[in-house]
Image (cartoon, rainbow, N blue to C red):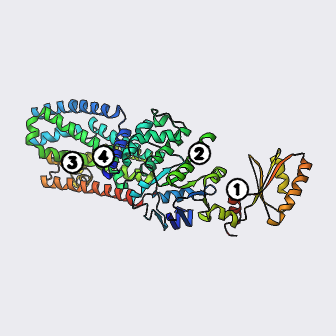
Amino acid sequence: MREIIVAEDLHKSYGRIVALRGLNLKVHEGSIMGLIGPNGAGKTTTIKIILGLLRPDKGEVYVFGENPWDNPKIKREIGVIYEKATFPEYYKVLDYLRRVCRIYGEPEQRAKEVLELVGLEAYNRTIKNLSAGMLQKFAIAHALIHHPRLIIADEPASNLDPEARSKLLDLILRLHKEEGVTFLISSHILPELGRVCDSVAIINKGKILASGNLMKLFKKYSIRAIRISTDKPNDFANALKRLSYVEDISVDDKGVLLTVKEEAEREVYEDSLRIAKEIGATILGIEMGVTSLEQLYHRVIRIGGDV
Amino acid sequence: MFRKGKAFLEVLAIMLHEDYKFPVLELFVFLFVLSTFILMSPTSFQAITFHYTKERMIYALISAQMDIPGIPFLIFLILVLKNIAYGFGSDFEKGTIQVLLSYPLRRSALLTAKLISGLGIPLVMFVGIGIFALYVLFPKLVLNGITYIVISYLAFLSYGLLITAIILLLVIYLKRSGAPLAVGMAFCFLRIIARGLLDLYVEATKRTTPLKIISIFDSSLALRYYCEHTIWSPSSSEVMGYVIISYCLVLGLFLIAYYYFSRRLDI
C-alpha cells in the first residue's frame, strides 16, 4: 500500500531541549496508526512537523508525496483534531462550520451533517460558550467537513465522556471502513486506541522504538499476556509482582494483566491458585494468550525497542 | 469545488468577524467622525483668519486629525493595536492560528488577510472619513490640492505604520499579545516626548541634524518644517524624499514580517 506520510531522520530541538533525534515514520494509506509514547516523547512535535506547523532542524517529511511546509494544497486532504483546539470564539457553531464548508467548496448542508455525526446539537451556541467536551466534538466535526483522506488526531478523546469516546471510536472505524480514511492518532488511552488501530508507532525520547503492524509487533515482542479475573485484582497483582518470572503487570477493569517469560506459563496457573488461597481471593477466570497494546507499549519502552 | 481565492475571502471574513465584533467598528467610526469635525472646525477658522497658504492650510487641517496626541489618530492606533497586537497575539496564545493554518492557504495569504482586517480597514476608514470631512468643510481646497493632501496623509501615517510593522514583528516573534501591546503604546508616548524634547533642543542649539534623523522615521516632521519655514526649511523634493525613505523602512519591516511568518516561524 502507498505511503501517505513519510518522515525521514527528523531532528528538532527547542533551545537546549531535544524533542526529536532522528525519527523515522511511515503511515500507509488505509491504515489506522496509533502514535504512542510517554509525555514529552515527541508526539506533538512529530504531528506539528507533519502538518507543516514546525520545520525540522534536519530530515524530511512528505505527506501525499509533498513537503507540507511548502504545499498548503495538501491540507485539502487532511483533517486535523488538536488536543486543545481554539476556534474563532465569537462565531456560532453552525455559522462557523458553514463558513468552513465554503473554504473547502463543500455544500453548506455538510455542516449539519458533521454535527449530527458527532452528536453535537448546540447549533446556535457561540463557540466560546461550549463546554470542553462539546468543543472537542466540534473539533472533530470541523475535521470531517471536507471529507479528508487523512485525519491526524492529537488526543482526540480527551475531554470526552466514556459514551462519547466509544462513539468516537465507532466513528473512526466507520470512516475507515466506508470511506477508506487513513488515521494517525496520538493518544494516552491505550485500551481504546488498541480497539481501533491496526498499526502502531511507539515513540520515546524523540525516536521511534518500534512501529508497524500491531499483530506483527505482538509476535515480535512475544506479547502473550495472561489475564486473571478476580474479585481482588490489586491484592492479586501485588502478590504476583514478587514472582521472578513476571515481566510486566497491570490492573485494568477486567482484572490483572501480566506478561511472563515464555517457559513459565504453566507455573502461573499453579501460583495463581496458591495466591488466591493465601489472600482469600476468588479467581473468576484465567485467559491465556491475551494481546494488549498496553503490554506491548510497556515492553517496548522497557527494553528500548530492540529484541 | 475548492477555489483558492474564495478560501482567502472566507478566511478574511472570519478575521473581520472576530476583529470587529459589534459594536467595535461602529463605535470607533462614530468617535472618529465626531472628533474629526470637532478638531477641524477651530483649525479651519484659524486657517482662514490668518490667511494661510493652500499648503499650510492643508497641513494644519490634516495635522488636527492625524498628529499625536490628536483624538482621531489615537482612535486609529487603538484599533490597530487591538487588532494586531491583542487580536493576532491572542491567536498565537490561544492556538487559533493552528486552526487557521489547517486551511489550504499559504501562510502569506493568511497574514495578508490579517493585515487587511486589522490594518487595512481602519486605514481606509481613517483616511476616507478624514478626506470626507475636509471635503465637507473645504470642497474647493480638496479638489485643487488633492496631491498635497495625499502626500500629507502619507507623511502623517508613516510613523503609525512604522509602529504597526514593529508590533507585527514582535507579535510574530514572541507569539504573545501583552508585550507588543505595551511596546506599541510606549512608542506612541515616546513620539510625544521625543517631539517635545526635540523642539527644545533645536530651539536652544539651532542644529537641524536631529530633525533630519527623526524625519526618516516620521516624515510628518519634515512636512511640518516645510510648511512653517522656521529653523529648518526642507524643499518639497526633500519632503518627498523623507516620505519615500520612511515608507521604504515600513515596507522593509513588513517584508521581514512576511518572510519570517511564511518561511521561518514555528507554531
In the picture of the structure, the residue carrying the numbered disc 2 is A158
Quote the CA–CA distance across marks 4 and 3: 21 Å
Discs 3/2, front = 2
In the picture of the structure, the residue carrying the numbered disc 1 is A292
The spot of residue B192 in percent (x, y) is 30, 43
- Going by the numbered disc 4, the residue's amino acid type is Ile
Tell me whether marks 1 and 2 sit on the same chain.
yes
Dot 4: chain letter: B
Q: In this view, does A58 lie above or below B187?
A: below
Q: In this view, does B202 lie to the left or right of B139?
A: right
Tell me whether marks 4 and 3 sit on the same chain.
yes
- Going by the numbered disc 3, the residue's amino acid type is Ala
Mark linked to residue B155: 3
Q: Is mark 3 on a helix, strand or loop?
A: helix
Dot 3: chain letter: B
The spot of residue A16 in percent (x, y) is 55, 62
Tell me whether marks 4 and 1 sit on the same chain.
no
Tell me whether marks 1 and 3 sit on the same chain.
no
